[in-house]
Amino acid sequence: MRYFKSFLLVFLVFISLNLYAQSKYAVSINYTPVLNTSDFESVFGGKTGKKVKLDDQGLIREMEFIAMPNTVFDILETIPKEDYNIYKVTTNDYQYNGDFYIDSRFVRVDDSRLEDRWKIIPTKEEVIKNMNALDGYPYMWGGNAADGISDMLTYYKPAGDIDEATKTNWTMKGVDCSGLIYQSTGGATPRNTSTLCIYGTGIDIENLTADEISNKLQPLDIIVWSGHVIIVLDDKTVIESTPAEGVHKSDLLSRLNSVMNERRAVNDWAATSGKRFVVRRWMQ
């Protein structure tokens, strides 16, 4: 029994050292698309080599988000391709459920894990300036690199000429609703609305009218629920990104009224259920 225990201990140490030796880490060189499928070529190209895979709403549902430069990834699995690899990864920048994949050509690989990229929220004035600069950009599911990633046209070269709409999708140009905040803060805020619902400090809005709520709002407060976020720019204006209109501004009170026609105002997202929304203050 004693010899068996010794053998088992040596075996476990060997396995642990072997796994440690195989551990690899990646750091994004530039903006890096993160997908929930390892089959990038089926999304960007498809059978014809000229199509981007879209759902019935015209969205690339395989997109999760676009990692900022210097994002650190833990490589869980390597899937070899002809002249590159697809990595199955995790990252502290995107702590959500699911399987996530990146293309090796967007990153450099290291044997040791580097420190996660610094997340410093710009000043309120800088964030508002950044948001205003994105006004008019298209909506892109999972998008937070508004000008797109031109390398996608090199790494997944179309088999022929493509129109501008396809090129926009191919390069992932535009931002989604939470991507509007994520890009404007340099990736310092949570990436998805499910986390934005509990981010910052809650503002008491329950049982208040739209007028009463609007009077409590400050620039960069967010009107948010799991699925969408609207950002306050000033005492009269909000900005958001929607599939129908892309990034656009509208009247604060009118938009708040439209939200309250469908959802009820609550103070605590986690303690409530149903069709509701909260207001969170994350910038002083």
Image: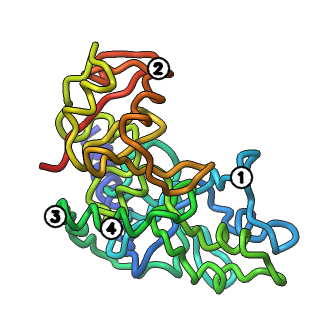
Q: CA distance from mark 4 to mark 2?
A: 31 Å
Instruction: Give the label on residue 275, or none.
Output: 2
Q: Would you call the spot at circle 2 few (<14 residues within 10 Å), some (14-19), or many (20 or more)?
A: few
Helix, strand, or loop for circle 1?
Answer: loop
Q: Horizontal and vertical percent for residue 137? A: 52, 65
Q: Horizontal and vertical percent for residue 87? A: 52, 67
Of the residues shown, which amino acid type is indicated by label 2?
Lys
User: What residue did someone put label 3 on?
Assistant: 123
Q: Measuring 65% from the left and 86% from the top, which residue is drawn there?
A: 154
Q: Measuring 36% from the left and 75% from the top, which residue is drawn there?
A: 69
Question: Could you tell me which quadrant the N terminus lies in?
Answer: top left
- Of marks 3 and 2, which one's residue comes earlier in the chain? 3
- Of marks 3 and 1, which one's residue comes earlier in the chain? 1
User: What residue did someone put label 4 on?
Assistant: 130
- Of marks 1 and 2, which one's residue comes earlier in the chain? 1
Q: Horizontal and vertical percent for residue 206? A: 27, 17
Q: Are marks 1 and 4 in contact (CB under 8 Å)?
A: no
Q: Are marks 3 and 1 in contact (CB under 8 Å)?
A: no
Of the residues shown, which amino acid type is indicated by label 3?
Thr
Q: Find residue 56 and report its image quarter.
A: top right
Q: Horizontal and vertical percent for residue 216? A: 19, 32
Q: Nearer the viewer, mark 4 or mark 2?
A: 4
User: What residue did someone put label 1 on?
Assistant: 58
Helix, strand, or loop for circle 3?
Answer: loop
Helix, strand, or loop for circle 4?
Answer: helix
The front one of 80 and 170 is 170
With 48 as the anchor, is 185 left or right in this view?
A: left
